[in-house]
C-alpha cells in the first residue's frame, strides 16, 4: 500500500478567498487549449484562423462550466435539484460532470460555428484534440481534493484517503483517469489528427476513445454513494453515460469515411 501524499487542496489564499488546485487545473487546461489552438490554427487545413482562437476558447470555457455543472445536477443530483433548485448555483457542493460539459461544449461550438460561418464538423475536429490535457489535469485536481476515489483494493499501490470515512485501501482511480483520459487520449488525438481526415472523423475518434477509456476505468472507481450500481449489479451511471458516446463515435467514423476525403481549409467555411 502506498501512503496518500498529503497535499492541501487549497493552493493559496488571498485574504478570505481560497484558490483550490482543482480551479487552477481548469485554468491550466484552458491555457493549454488556447496555446495548442494557436499552433494548430497555422495549419493549412485549419478551419479556424488565429484571430478567431480567443473567442473560440471563451465559448468553450462557457460550455464546459455551464454544461458541466448542469450535467452534474441532472445526471447525478436530480433529486437534490428537484428538492432545492438553488443548489444548482452552489458550485462548491457536488461537482462537475464531463458528459454535461461535453454537451455544453457541443452547444457552444454550434453557436460559435454559426457566428463565424464555419462548418460544425470541421470546427469540432479542430476542438477535439484540445480537450484531453484539461481532462487529465482535472483528474489530478480530483486526486488532490480526495474526490471520486476508487474501489477498495489490495493492489500494492492502493491508498487510504484521509477523507474516506471507511478508511479503506482503494484504487487511486483519479490517477488512472489522468493517465487514460489525459495522457493516452491526448496521444491518440494528436497522432490521428496529425494529417487531414474526413470531416467528423477526428470528433468520432475522440467520442469513441473517451467512451471506451472511461467505461473501462469505471470498473476501478467507486460509484457515487447516493446512486450505487445502476444495472446488473456492476454497471455505473458513468458507464451508462459512456454508451451514447461510444455509439456516436462509431457513427461519426462511419459517416466521415462514407463522405470521402477531408475538405481543405477554404472548404471548411459555409
Image (spheres, helix red, strand yellow):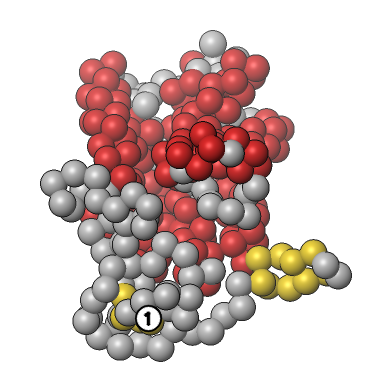
151 in relation to 55, above or below: below
Q: Position of residue 158 (x, y in %)?
A: 30, 80
Residue 221 appears left or right of 142 = left
Work out which residue is located at the far left of the displayed protein and give it: 232
Residue 45 appears left or right of 237 = right
Q: Give the residue drawn at x 59%, y 20%.
A: 111
Q: Position of residue 257 (x, y in %)?
A: 25, 23
Question: Front-most of 74 and 82?
Answer: 82
The quarter of the picture where the N terminus appears is: bottom left
Q: Give the residue drawn at x 24%, y 45%.
A: 230
124 in relation to 88, above or below: above
Q: Position of residue 88 (x, y in %)?
A: 60, 40
State whether residue 93 appears in this view. Answer: yes
187 in relation to 74, above or below: below
The residue identified by callout 1 is 167
Secondary structure under the numbered disc 1 in the rendered image: loop
Residue 147 appears left or right of 25 = left
Q: Position of residue 197 (x, y in %)?
A: 35, 31
Q: Give the residue drawn at x 25%, y 37%.
A: 243
Question: Front-most of 190 and 42?
Answer: 190
Name which quarter of the figure residue 65 lies in. Answer: top right
Q: Give the residue drawn at x 74%, y 73%.
A: 12
Amino acid at each position: 500500500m502506498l501512503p496518500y501524499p498529503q497535499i492541501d487542496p487549497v493552493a493559496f489564499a488571498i485574504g478570505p478567498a481560497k484558490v483550490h488546485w482543482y480551479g487552477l487545473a481548469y485554468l491550466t487546461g484552458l491555457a493549454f487549449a488556447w496555446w495548442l489552438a494557436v499552433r494548430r490554427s497555422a495549419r493549412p487545413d485549419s478551419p479556424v484562423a488565429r484571430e478567431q482562437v480567443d473567442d473560440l476558447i471563451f465559448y468553450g470555457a462557457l460550455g464546459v462550466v455551464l454544461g458541466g455543472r448542469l450535467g452534474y445536477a441532472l445526471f447525478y443530483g436530480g433529486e437534490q435539484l428537484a428538492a432545492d433548485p438553488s443548489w444548482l448555483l452552489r458550485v462548491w457542493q457536488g461537482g462537475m460532470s464531463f458528459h454535461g460539459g461535453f454537451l455544453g461544449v457541443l452547444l457552444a461550438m454550434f453557436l460559435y460555428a454559426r457566428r463565424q460561418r464555419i462548418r460544425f464538423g470541421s470546427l469540432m475536429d479542430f476542438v477535439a484534440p484540445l480537450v484531453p490535457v484539461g481532462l487529465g489535469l482535472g483528474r489530478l485536481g480530483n486526486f488532490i481534493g480526495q474526490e471520486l476515489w476508487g474501489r477498495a483494493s489490495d493492489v500494492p499501490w492502493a491508498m487510504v484517503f484521509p477523507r474516506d470515512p471507511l478508511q479503506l485501501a482503494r484504487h487511486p482511480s483519479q490517477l488512472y483517469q489522468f493517465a487514460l483520459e489525459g495522457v493516452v487520449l491526448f496521444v491518440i488525438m494528436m497522432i490521428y489528427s496529425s494529417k487531414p481526415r474526413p470531416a467528423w472523423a477526428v470528433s468520432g475518434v475522440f467520442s469513441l476513445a473517451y467512451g471506451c477509456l472511461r467505461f473501462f476505468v469505471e470498473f476501478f472507481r467507486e460509484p457515487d454513494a447516493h446512486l450505487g450500481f445502476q444495472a446488473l449489479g456492476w454497471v455505473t451511471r458513468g458507464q451508462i453515460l459512456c454508451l451514447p458516446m461510444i455509439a456516436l463515435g462509431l457513427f461519426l467514423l462511419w459517416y466521415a469515411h462514407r463522405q470521402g476525403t477531408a475538405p481543405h481549409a477554404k472548404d471548411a467555411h459555409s
